[in-house]
Amino acid sequence: MRDSAGTPAPPVINQFDANGHLIGGTSPQFFILDSAPAAHFEPATGILFGDKLGVVNFIGQVGGLQTPSVQVPVTVLPTVIDEGRGALDTIKAPLNQDTTLALPIGQGASSLPVIVSGVGDTGVQGVVVHYTITRSLAANNATRQAVYITGPGGKLTNVDTTNLSGAAGRDQINVKASLLADVAIATGQKVDSVIVQATATYKGTSLAGSPVTFVFHVVGTIAP
């Protein structure tokens, strides 16, 4: 197991008292549930090490309390990040008063698809991808951004995690025309651009291909 930077890290269990306050306490124990496990815990460090491709299921325990089981993929070494399919060239942002955060793809938003692969061009699951807006557009409201990233459930985020095929594409870039400071962009009289970069690391070193750069032309449209 590794943290979001790809550095080896043991699992942890957060312990709370009856009032929901985080506390210290008994050292946790972890138990692999599989009869022919794809990984093992290193006794000295508590880090989970993969032994073969597959998945490993384990639980944690503190005293007499057990956690739900956790499934961790065991995959190949990630080496490369590249742009996936589905990103739009142009974001057409309707000028309306939609209050939802996550806008419809093609109507003010675009997906941010990337692929992380390893040896033999194998997709790598479980890699954390970080997104950064490196060129934005000014907002007309000091408390609200006109350009922002959302993830599953429409929540603000800047990270995603690759799936079984090595793809990350659940996050999306949103442009809310009603919040743009430049009225010419918001009303479709001028085209500007937004740039988003996607990165992933392993053992603290950026994967080849980082950063993946998405350039979106932005033009407002008058909503019917």
Image (spheres, rainbow, N blue to C red):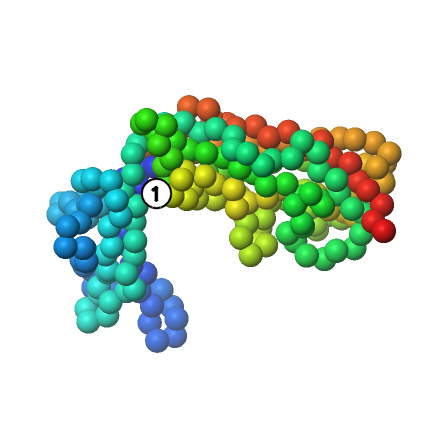
Name the residue: 79% across, 55% down.
97
Q: Is residue 128 left or right of residue 113?
A: left
Q: Position of residue 141 (x, y in %)?
A: 76, 48
The answer to whether residue 35 shows anywhere in this view is yes
Q: Position of residue 84 (x, y in %)?
A: 52, 33
Name the residue: 18% across, 40% down.
51
Q: Is residue 102 left or right of residue 77?
A: right
Q: Position of residue 113 (x, y in %)?
A: 53, 37
Query: Residue lying furthest bottom in this view?
Result: 18
Name the residue: 31% across, 27% down.
119
Vertical position of residue 2 compared to residue 118: above or below: below
Q: Mark 1 highlights which residue?
A: 3
All told, the count of numbered labels is 1
Residue 109 position by quadrant: top right
Residue 110 position by quadrant: top right
Q: Position of residue 174 (x, y in %)?
A: 66, 44
Vertical position of residue 144 compared to residue 53: above or below: below
Q: Mark 1: which amino acid?
A: Asp
Q: Nearer the viewer, residue 169 or 64?
A: 169
The answer to whether residue 30 shows anywhere in this view is no
Name the residue: 48% across, 28% down.
82
Vertical position of residue 178 compared to residue 165: above or below: below
Q: Where does the N terminus fall, quadrant-wise?
A: top left
Mark 1, residues whose alpha carbon is within 10 Å: few (<14), some, or many (≥20)?
some
Q: Nearer the viewer, residue 221 or 62?
A: 221
Q: Secondary structure at mark 1?
A: loop
